């Protein structure tokens, strides 16, 4: 029997990416949507015509025909509605960042453990084979000791003042929206945590629109220097480079693979022919839903537990704490 999904809110991202992914994923079925504006449901019903509509989030959570819920709500609502969904007996996949502060994860972890449900941040990149390949190459010593990591993620939404990313009251800002990638991806691939960070921030209307983070991280891959740029006011860019003593790994579409560009990983090593790994047509959102189903129904290991997400949130919290205005 397929895992039956409901979505809380008719967000554009849910309509364009996650709802189609749930619909396409093996072992999953999109059965319900909660929105107070029925006109917003049309885009979902175009590919899921049998979708049940609920006019409130509470009504969807009371639907006995829903096993799991996907939460694409504004950031400041994530913890509240994740806890309500858990209390209603639903598995939860929640958009990033799942919380506003690392300490908020403690209630989510406790509720998950007490319920036995799968509760996770929707950190889809960990399900993409390019990131699993990068992690395996680093762990296997393909580039020797990691010495430096560069990450960058930027886009420009200055013409959208009403966008929730540009509004402080909805938990907006570039760090929460895309820092979760430039920080968390390095933690995932290297097993390292920050040991010393500095940050320079620009703000508009109470949200960060640019952040430059430098410092050091340490863990299974050793101790290395780190640099990250996030911005909501720069020309679009995505790139991650792991530079080692004996080689280099570059990911050219690390975060929005298939949308920003084809997922590619370059491996350059001293004295060896450079290698290029490509993953055309891979949909990391579908892979995430299918992995979620396997974890719920077959007990398969889940690659991104709440404890991992709490660590990324702690790193974001640290950036805010040490940041200086420019």
Image: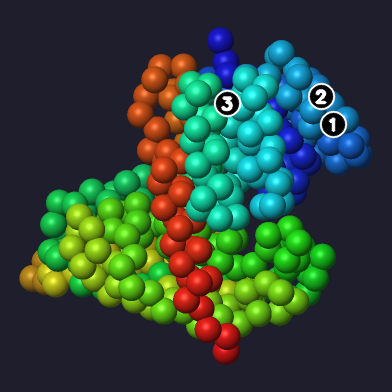
Q: Is residue 135 visible?
A: yes
Toward the bottom, the furthest residue is 326
Q: Is residue 187 left or right of residue 113?
A: left
Q: Are marks 3 and 2 in contact (CB under 8 Å)?
A: no
Residue 326's tag is: none
Q: Is residue 8 left or right of residue 79?
A: right
Nearer to me, 193 or 250: 193
The N terminus appears in which quarter of the rendering?
top right
Residue 183, compared with residue 105, is above or below; it is below
- The residues bearing labels 3 and 1 have C-alpha atoms spaced at a distance of 18 Å
**Lower sequence index among marks 3 and 2:** 2
Q: Are marks 2 and 1 in contact (CB under 8 Å)?
A: yes
Q: Secondary structure at mark 2?
A: helix
The C terminus appears in which quarter of the rendering?
bottom right
| Residue highlighted by disc 2 | 59
**Lower sequence index among marks 3 and 1:** 1
- Picture coordinates of residue 207 (x, y %)? 68, 72
Q: Secondary structure at mark 3?
A: strand
Residue 56's tag is: 1
Nearer to me, 246 or 280: 246
Residue 64, compared with residue 231, is above or below; it is above
- The residues bearing labels 2 and 1 have C-alpha atoms spaced at a distance of 5 Å
- Picture coordinates of residue 24 (x, y %)? 59, 30
Categorize mark 3 by other alpha carbons within 10 Å: few (<14), some (14-19), many (20+): many
Nearer to me, 309 or 164: 309
Going 60% across and 68% down the picture, which residue do you hit? 174
- The residues bearing labels 3 and 2 have C-alpha atoms spaced at a distance of 16 Å
| Residue highlighted by disc 3 | 91
Label count reads 3
Q: Secondary structure at mark 1?
A: loop
């Amino acid at each position: 029997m397929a895992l039956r999904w409901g979505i809380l809110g008719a967000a554009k991202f849910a309509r364009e990416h996650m709802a189609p992914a749930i619909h396409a994923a093996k072992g999953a079925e999109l059965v319900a949507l909660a929105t107070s504006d029925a006109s917003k449901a049309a885009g979902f019903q175009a590919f899921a015509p049998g979708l049940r509509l609920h006019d409130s989030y509470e009504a969807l959570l009371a639907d006995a025909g829903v096993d799991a819920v996907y939460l694409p709500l504004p950031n400041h609502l994530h913890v509240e509605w994740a806890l309500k969904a858990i209390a209603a007996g639903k598995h939860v996949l929640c958009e990033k960042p799942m919380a506003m502060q690392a300490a908020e994860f403690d209630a989510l972890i406790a509720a998950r453990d007490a319920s036995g449900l799968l509760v996770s941040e929707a950190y889809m990149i960990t399900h993409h084979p390019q990131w699993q390949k990068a992690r395996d190459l680093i762990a296997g010593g393909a580039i020797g000791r990691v010495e430096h990591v560069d990450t960058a993620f930027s886009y420009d939404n200055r013409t959208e003042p009403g966008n929730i990313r540009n509004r402080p009251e909805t938990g907006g800002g570039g760090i929460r929206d895309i820092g979760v990638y430039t920080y968390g991806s390095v933690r995932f691939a290297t097993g390292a945590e920050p040991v010393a960070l500095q940050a320079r921030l620009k703000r508009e209307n109470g949200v960060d629109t640019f952040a430059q983070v430098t410092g050091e991280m340490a863990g299974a891959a050793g101790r290395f220097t780190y640099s990250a740029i996030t911005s909501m006011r720069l020309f679009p860019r995505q790139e991650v480079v792991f530079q080692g003593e004996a080689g280099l790994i570059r990911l050219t579409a690390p975060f929005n693979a298939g949308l920003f560009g084809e997922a590619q990983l370059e491996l350059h090593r001293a004295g060896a022919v450079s290698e290029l790994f490509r993953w055309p047509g891979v949909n990391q959102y579908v892979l995430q839903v299918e992995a979620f189903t396997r974890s719920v129904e077959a007990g398969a290991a889940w690659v991104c537990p709440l404890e991992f997400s709490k660590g990324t949130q702690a790193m974001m919290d640290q950036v805010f704490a040490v940041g200086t205005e420019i």
